[in-house]
Amino acid sequence: MLKLPDNILHLLEYRIINIKEMDGWLHFQVDAPDPFACEECGVQGEFVRFGKRDVPYRDLPIHGKRVTLWVIHRRYTCRACNTTFRPQLPEMVDGFRMTLRLHEYVEKESFNHPCTYVAEQTGLDEKTVQDIFNIRAEFLSRWHRFEMPRVLGIDELYLNRPYRCILTNIEERLCSNYCPPGVRM
């Protein structure tokens, strides 16, 4: 068992119970926070614990090791409205069983790197990375209109040392400057 500082996850609402390192993975058992009120009727303090289960969630790698959070997700029964509920977990994306910060990281990185690379880096399945990319791309396409010119002009320009590609919409006389990756404009 590893001894790591309590705040290594930076998930303030969760309490780390146990940490194990196995085959390049860090496994954290964490206790989810208790709900503030019943999710059905909103009454405070009138619910009791009614079972639990460990649910795996992926998180960002720590020091090059992939991370799984085993969240103790409790079920509660409200005495006021007699309903049973599992509270929504803060900082988690249930549809993908990962932390919100990992989801945001995958969204960003999948636009900059191949899905196989992002999947290998985070320990996720490649299909999961593709699904996150597709959802984000569909969301962005609603606000951005892609236009392809009928006549495209291509030229280069040597400016501040690197060559730059100049793409021009010849019919409408619009210009776009492309700088290769790793080169500052």
Image: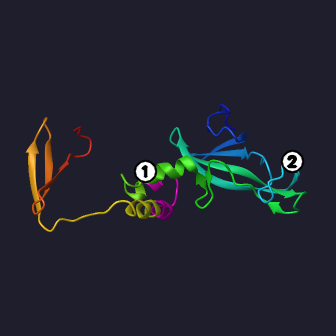
- The type of residue carrying mark 2 is Gly
Q: Residue 57 at x, y = what percent?
A: 63, 53
Residue 178 is covered by the magenta coloring: no
Q: Secondary structure at mark 2?
A: loop
- Report whether 135 appears left or right of 153: right
Q: Secondary structure at mark 1?
A: helix
- The type of residue carrying mark 1 is Lys
Q: Measured along the vertical axis of the image, is residue 24 above or below residue 40?
A: above
Q: Residue 112 at x, y = what percent?
A: 36, 51
Q: Nearer the viewer, residue 159 or 24?
A: 159
Q: What segment carries the magenta color?
A: 118-132
Density class for disc 1 (Cα within 10 Å; few <14, some 14-19, many ≥20) is some
Query: How was the colour assigned to the protein in this rendering?
Result: rainbow
Q: Residue visible at 48% across and 48% down?
A: 105
Determine which residue is flagged by label 2: 45
Determine which residue is flagged by label 1: 108
Q: In the rendered image, which quarter contains the N terminus?
A: top right
